[in-house]
Structure formats: structure tokens, C-alpha cells
Amino acid sequence: MSESVLSLKDVRITNGFNGQELVHGVSFDLQPGGVVGIVGESGSGKTLTCRSALGILPEGLSVSAGSISIAGSDISGLSSKQWTQLRGSTISAVFQDPASYLNPSLTIGSQIGEVLRVKAGLRRREARSRALELLAAVHLRNPHLVYDQYPFELSGGMQQRVLIAAAISLEPRVLIADEATTALDVTVQAEILDLLSDLRQSIGLGLVVVSHDLAVVAQLCEEVLVMRSGDVVEQGPTAKVLHQPQHEYTQLLIREHEQYGLDKFLEAADV
Ligand SMILES: Nc1ncnc2c1ncn2[C@@H]1O[C@H](COP(=O)(O)OP(=O)(O)OP(=O)(O)O)[C@@H](O)[C@H]1O
């Protein structure tokens, strides 16, 4: 097996203000081109787990035990300068509500171009052609048009594609998608999930997909962690967890989905 691009070993996260432990031990290994899903209800610790791997825990919160390695290097003790270098170029993320991550007063092209100029050191013309390539890579139909548009001129699905383009612009090895499709309607959600799956195959991107929605995780992930109240209550190959859920909370999540026809997703998890 090749080296993990992201490895969490019994990661615990504690609120330093009151000593409360919020995440009680999360472990997984993400291989290049692999997909790990984290599912669970609101407040279960999914986002904090992701933020710990991105070095962006909220103030006062820290990894109090366990370890995190990115591409084989332990990240504890990284300086903020080292984090700035790592984020984007090795590990990157997209979140819910794409509009809030785009500057409303700048065109799409200038926002992606700026990342490429500042972080990859490209000259203006190179940055433009690379930005156009990236917009095409995320299947935006008319990259030249989108390049000159402002965020408000794009639909939510297109904005999320733009953010995915920005997130992969420095060729990271890991992309964390935290509820990245939650705000989108079901058809657009499926298109974005297809896009992530494509990128995984085409550029070997390792994915961590976080969702409260079991169907999203079933569609894309090889391994799933089910979280509740800061605990991983169940973890294993997606097909196994969905077909033979051991924990009553996983069983509950699956029952809740049955009314929407989880059969479809169980089939997806068989492949
Ligand atoms: N800045 C913070 N200070 C104190 N507690 C926090 C902070 N951020 C999150 N928490 C607590 O940590 C727990 C886990 O939160 P987290 O955001 O990781 O959950 P989540 O599973 O991602 O939920 P959601 O889907 O709503 O984002 C929650 O109980 C939350 O109240």
C-alpha cells in the first residue's frame, strides 16, 4: 500500500477555555486517490475533525491527543508560515455556502489568477491560461465567459465548481469537502459529486467527504466513519457499514433514509 496522504491517529480535540473534550478519538488513513467519508448529525464533530487536519481549529480549541500526518509528515508544531505553505499546495478544502468564500467585487478570473500568481508564482499571462484550464477541468461549460464574470452572475453549483477549481489550483494531494454539496439542489449535488470522483481518478486527489447525508457518502466513499457526539460509533468499508450496520445510531440513519429510497445508494456502495 502506498503512503497515506492524510493520516489521523486517535485525534482528540479539546476546548482549552473549559477543558471540555469535543472530539474523542478519530483515526483514518487516506490513500492517494482514496475517499473517506465522515457522516453524522449536526454537532457530532465532523467539522472540527476536518479543521484539525487543515490547521484551522477555532481559537481556544486544539488537538489534545493523537497525531495527524499529511503526506507522511507530522503536522504538530508547524509554524503559521509552514501552514500557509501547506494549505492549498498539499491539503485544501471546500465548504458549504460557496458565495461566502468568493469576493463579490472581483471577477472569477482575477480571484483564481491571484492564487496562482501569489502562491504558485505564475506571471499574469500564465496565470490566466492556467485559470482557464482549471475552469474547464471543473466542467464549467464556457470557461472564457466565467473567467470574466462576477460571483453573483453564477449559480450556486457554478460557484462551488469555481471554488473547487481554486482549491485544486496548486495541485494538492488532499481535498476536504465539508458539506460542499449541502446547499445545492439534488441534481447539482450529484454533478458536483461526479466532478469530485473524476478529479480523484484524473489527478489522484485523496478526498475526505463530510456530510450529514448518508446518501452523499454512500455515492462516493470507500470507507465511512459514523460520528455522534464527538465519538466515532462505527467505521469500515462503506458497503459493509450500510448493509450490516452494527451500531444503533447507524441503523437509525439508514432507517431515516429508507423513505427516500436508500436502495439506490446501497447499490452505489456495492461497486
Ligand atoms: N469554537 C468552538 N468553541 C466551542 N465549542 C465548539 C466550537 N466549535 C464547535 N464546537 C462544539 O464542538 C462540537 C462539534 O462541532 P462540529 O462543528 O465539529 O460539528 P459538526 O458535526 O461539523 O456539525 P455541523 O454539521 O453542524 O457543522 C459541537 O458540540 C460544537 O458545539
Image (cartoon, grey):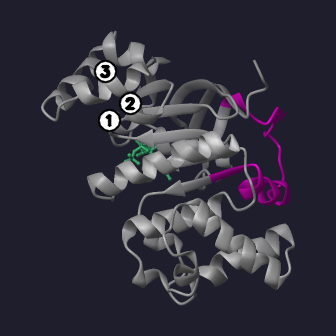
- Residue that carries the numbered disc 2 in the rendered image: 218
- Marks 1 and 2, how far apart at CA: 5 Å
Q: Residue 250 shows which numbered tag? A: 3
Mark 1 near mark 2, Cβ–Cβ under 8 Å? yes
Range of the magenta residues? 65-92
Q: In front: 224, or 55?
A: 224
| Rendering coords of residue 217 (x, y %) | 41, 34
Of pointers 3 and 2, the one earlier in the residue sequence = 2
| Rendering coords of residue 171 (x, y %) | 74, 54
Residue 15 appears in the picture as rendered? no
Residue at 62%, 39% in the rendered image: 201
Farthest residue, direction front: 141
| Disc 3 C-beta below 8 A from ligand 1 | no
- Classify residue 259 by image quadrant: top left
Does 91 sit left or right of 36 as displayed?
Answer: right
Specify the amino acid type for callout 2: Ala
Q: Residue 109 shows which numbered tag? A: none
How crowded pointer 1 is (Cα within 10 Å; few <14, some 14-19, many 20+) is rated as many
Q: Nearer the viewer, mark 3 or mark 2?
A: 2
Query: Does the magenta portion include 76?
Result: yes
| Rendering coords of residue 113 (x, y %) | 71, 78
